[in-house]
Amino acid sequence: MKHQALRFLRRFTGFAAVLTFAAAFGAAGAAEWPERPITLLVPFNAGGSVDRMARGLAPYLSKSLGQPVTVVNRPGAGGQVGTTWFLQQPDDGYTLLLTPAMPYIATNILVTGAKYTLDDFAFVNAQWSDYTMLAVHKDKPYQSLKDLIDAIKANPGKLSTGVTFGSAGQISTMMLLEAFGIPADGVRVVTYDGGGPVRTALAGGHLDFSVLQGEGSETVREFIRPLAVFREDRAKEWDAPTINEALKGMGTGMDVLSGSVRVVASSAEFRKKNPKGFERLTAAYKQALENEEYRAWLAKNKIGDDWVGPEKTTARLKTNFEILKKYQHLLKKRKK
C-alpha cells in the first residue's frame, strides 16, 4: 500500500506539473499586445512633414505602449511603394502606417492602379488635417478670385500654376477650372516634387497662382496674397473668404476637398483578428496626445494635435474618397 501511494503521488505530481506548464504557456500566449518593438512606416522621404510628425509621435507612443517604436521610410510613387509594403507585412500590429491618407491613398487607388482599397486599413486617428488655399504672388494684379478667373479666360494657356501630382492642391485646381468650363490646358501647369518647391516658386514670382497648403504656407506669408481658402469656414490664419464665398457672386460653386489628412493606421486584419490589441493601440495613441510635453512639441513645430478616433477618421476619409472618385477624370488628364 505504501508503494502504491508513492506511485500515485508521483503521477499526480507529474500531472500537476503539466497543468502548471500549460497554464503558464497559455498565459504567455494570451499576453496583451504589444510584446515586442513596433515599426512605424512612413511611405515618403525623411525630412518631410509626415516624417517629422512620425518622429515626434514615436517616443510618446512608445511610452504609452511600453515598447520601442522605430520610424522607417519607404518612399516611392506618391506613397504607393511603402503602403504596398506595409500591407504585405504580417497582420500582427507590429508594423503601423503613418501617411497622408487623403489624398494619396485615394489617388493611388483611383488613378495609379494600387491593388488595395480603403477597407484594407484600420484607421486609428486623423491627427493632422491641413486645408488648402488659392494664393497669388503679392505683386500680381489679382485682388480677388474673380480677377484671376477673368485673367485665365482672357489669356488661355498663359497663366501658370504649380502643383504636386496627386495632391489636394492639384485636384482642387482642376475642380475649380472645371467649375468655370476652363479646359485642362487653359492654364500652364508646372509639376513640382513636394509642397516646399511649389511655395518657393510662388514666393519667387515664378508662378501666377497656386493652390497650396494653408498651414504650411506661413513661411512665405510676406510674399503671397490669399484669394480663397478651401474650407467650409474661414481660416483664422489668413484674411481670405472661403472658396464658396468667393464663388457665390460668380454663378457657380464646388465641393470642398480636405487638404492633407495625416493618419495612423494598422491593417484591417489586425483589428479583426485582435480587437483588444487595436483597442490598446487606440487608447495608447490617445494617451500620447494627452501628454503635455508632446502637445508643447506639436505646437512648437506647427503640427496638428487632433483626436478624432477611428470611426470619425474613417468616415471623413470615405467622404473625401467619394469626392475624389467623382473627379478622378481630372487627375487622369494630368497623369504622367
Image: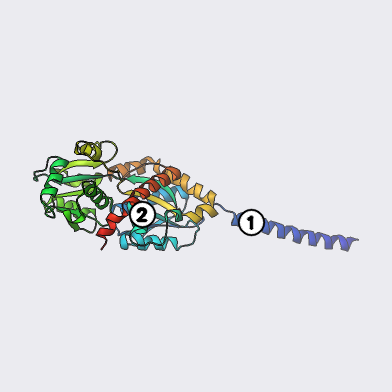
Question: What kind of colouring is applied to the model shown?
Answer: rainbow
Report the residue marked by disc 1. 26
Q: Which quadrant is the C terminus positioned in?
A: bottom left
Q: In terms of secondary structure, where does tag 2 sit?
A: helix
194 or 285, which is in the foreground?
Answer: 194
Q: Which is more N-terminal, label 1 or label 2?
A: 1
Residue 132: quadrant of the picture: top left
Residue denoted by label 2 = 106
- Other residues around mark 2 within 10 Å, as few (<14) / some (14–19) / many (≥20): many
**Quadrant into which the N terminus falls:** bottom right
Tag nearer the camera, 2 or 1? 2
Placement of 72 over or under 133, stated as above or below: below
Which residue type does callout 1 highlight? Answer: Gly
Crowding at label 1, few (<14), some or many (≥20) Cα neighbours within 10 Å? few
Q: In this view, does 10 lie to the left or right of 122?
A: right
- Give the percent coordinates (x, y) of residue 256: 29, 43
Q: Where is residue 17 in the image (x, y as percent from the top left)?
A: 72, 59
Amino acid beneath label 2: Ala
User: Which residue is at a point 36% across and 44% down the rendered structure image?
Assistant: 294
| Residue shown at the point (15%, 45%) measured from the top left | 149
The mark found on residue 91 in the picture is none
Q: In this view, does 151 lie to the left or right of 88?
A: left
